[in-house]
Image (tube, grey):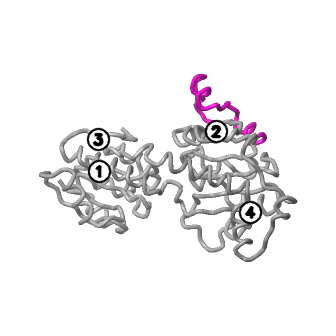
Amino acid sequence: MKILNTAPMTDATLKSILESRAPGLAFVVVEGHRLPEDELARRMADADIVLGDYTGATPITRRVVREAGQLKLIQQPSVGYNHIDIAACAEFGIPVANTPGANDLSVAEHTIMLALACLKRLTFYDAKTHQGEWLFMHAQRTGVFELAGKTYGLVGMGRTARAVAERLAPFGANLLYYDLVRLGSEEEKKYQASFAPLDALLKTADLVSLHLPLTKETERIIDAEKLALLKPSAILINVGRGALVDEAALAAALRAGKLAMAACDVFAEEPPPPGHPLRGLANVILTPHLAGSTREAGGRIIDMALTNLIRVLKGEAPRWVLNL
């Protein structure tokens, strides 16, 4: 079988790992990372399996999959898959799988870290202390805050948001959530979270974190109108997808003092270009899409992805298929 490797992992490394995990299987690995669309389509034509690009730098478009004559699986080694045209893959009968749940804990921890860093103004006081300023009284005057007793709103209540909810409970926060599908009463009790319509959640919450996939329905779900519903003291955290938020509107709200702070791990364009409206704002914490990139999560992702590749190499059906 032929494996087209579009991930930024050397072909030799991928081949070595697969051989160690499944000795005796016959396959070849072909380079596919960052190829032009035409060349990627040419190499896709006789591929049996594709390992996706977890950086998203190698798009798998309709043009590319249209040329696939015998493809049995596109395995994305991440939870996100926005760079793959999964609708086109479904049309041509090509299964696309990801690694669901592999980085839930990592993203949940990162979310709570950002929440606490905003409440405590961690980056500001870290920088000032490094500069030799001792702002003990400044903190008492301007206010740093506890998470206990705050109303925390989760927008989206999938696996990652549930992991956040489980870890927020010991802090004593009051949890609200919004999702298109409401949890059952037992699950709401388990996660100690109450359902609220999106507008009501935004008006009520002291902190809001976003955990939605990016779809036509969710793109810019947090726009200028929604941002205006938030309290001036509120904190917005985006660990979902950058385009869930109108970033220019968010920057305007932060500059105008209509929102206290924001923290973003994801951006509509990655990396955010020079002149991006959120870059350089003192009341924003920015991290480079690393919430799910812990060593532990990476190990789980690779394990799940390669397990699926080996299943298909053995003639078995893949798991975690998204589109068929």
Q: Are marks 4 and 1 in contact (CB under 8 Å)?
A: no
Name the residue that disc number 2 marks: 170
User: What's the CA distance linking mark 4 and mark 1?
Assistant: 41 Å
Q: In this view, does 282 lie to the left or right of 79?
A: right
Give, as a three-letter code, the residue at label 3: Pro
**Residue furthest out toward the top:** 185
Answer with left or right where residue 55 lies relative to residue 262: left
Which of 319/107 is in front? Answer: 107
- The tag on residue 306 is 1
Q: Which residue is at 81% across, 51% downward? A: 233
Q: Residue at x 58, y 37 (%)?
A: 166
Q: Give the alpha-carbon distance from disc 4 to disc 3, as whole Å.
A: 45 Å
The boundaries of the magenta stretch are 178-204
Secondary structure beneath dot 4 equals loop
Q: What element carries label 1?
A: helix
Q: CB atoms at circles 1 and 2 under 8 Å apart?
A: no
Q: Would you say residue 192 sits in the magenta stretch?
A: yes
Nearer the camera: disc 3 or disc 1:
1
Magenta highlight on residue 105: no
Earlier in the chain: of badge 4 and badge 3, it is 4
| Viewer-nearest residue: 265 or 272 | 265
Task: For marks 3 and 1, give the CA distance.
Answer: 11 Å
Amino acid on which disc 2 is placed: Pro
Q: Earlier in the sequence, mark 3 or mark 2?
A: 2
* Discs 1/2, front: 2
